[in-house]
Amino acid sequence: MKWALNLGAILMLTQLLAPVLIDAQSSNLDLPQAHAYAGCTLRIHVDRLHNSKGNIGTVIFTSPDGWPDDTSKAFRVGPAPIAPGEHQGTAVWNDLPSGDYGVAAIHDENSNAKLDKNLLGIPKEGFGFANNPHVGWGPAPFKAALVHVTCPVTETTIHMIYK
């Protein structure tokens, strides 16, 4: 019997609070959202691959901290396939919040999840950055590779560079 009374009290309380909750959701209050990720998608098209070996590795950073080599500080990192015989591919990142991201890609020909370099530190595999900034010695600056992601879909193209 106590359980039935408690259930009745809960139902009555929800009916009384429903208009307040609905009003709060429709206002401009900073309330926590049930889905923090707005569902934005970033499509990173990568072209000018020398071959179809391995995969395309992409990293997305929210700040210059660790950019672009320290993948432990990246917001997202992962591979995308290259179809046999193709010299291009696309990495797709779903469920991103809208905002600015530094974006880099590598042609990971041996699929070891890193950019291989020679003894002098010169990349042995292809690499590139969003907005295709000029790259001399060292990586492009974080700000030069920023992409502003908006919902529902943002697309960018990276031209692979081989040294």
Image (spheres, grey):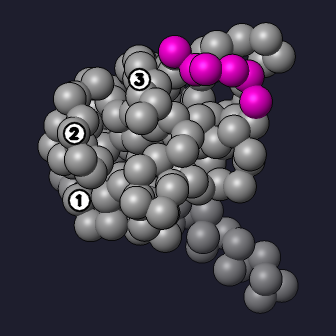
The answer to whether residue 98 shows anywhere in this view is no
Q: Of the numbered discs in the image, which one, if any, rests on residue 136?
A: 2
Residue 42: where, in percent of width, then height? 46, 29
Asked whether disc 1 touches disc 2, contact meaning CB atoms under 8 Å apart, the reply is: no
Residue found at the very far bottom of the displayed protein: 2
Which amino acid is tagged 1?
Pro
Q: Give left or right: position of 147 versus 33.
A: left
Instruction: Give yes or no for residue 121 being in the magenta stretch.
Output: no
Residue situated in front as seen by the camera: 156 or 3: 156
**Which residue is under mark 3?**
158
Which amino acid is tagged 2?
Gly
10 Å crowding of disc 2: few (<14), some (14-19), many (20+): few
Q: Nearer the viewer, mark 1 or mark 2?
A: 2
- As helix, strand or loop, the secondary structure at mark 1 comes to loop
Asked whether disc 2 touches disc 3, contact meaning CB atoms under 8 Å apart, the reply is: no
Q: Give left or right: position of 124 versus 61.
A: right
Residue situated in front as seen by the camera: 152 or 71: 71
10 Å crowding of disc 3: few (<14), some (14-19), many (20+): many
Residue 22: where, in percent of width, then height? 37, 44
**Which residue is under mark 1?**
64
User: Looking at the picture, does residue 1 appear above or below residue 125?
Assistant: below
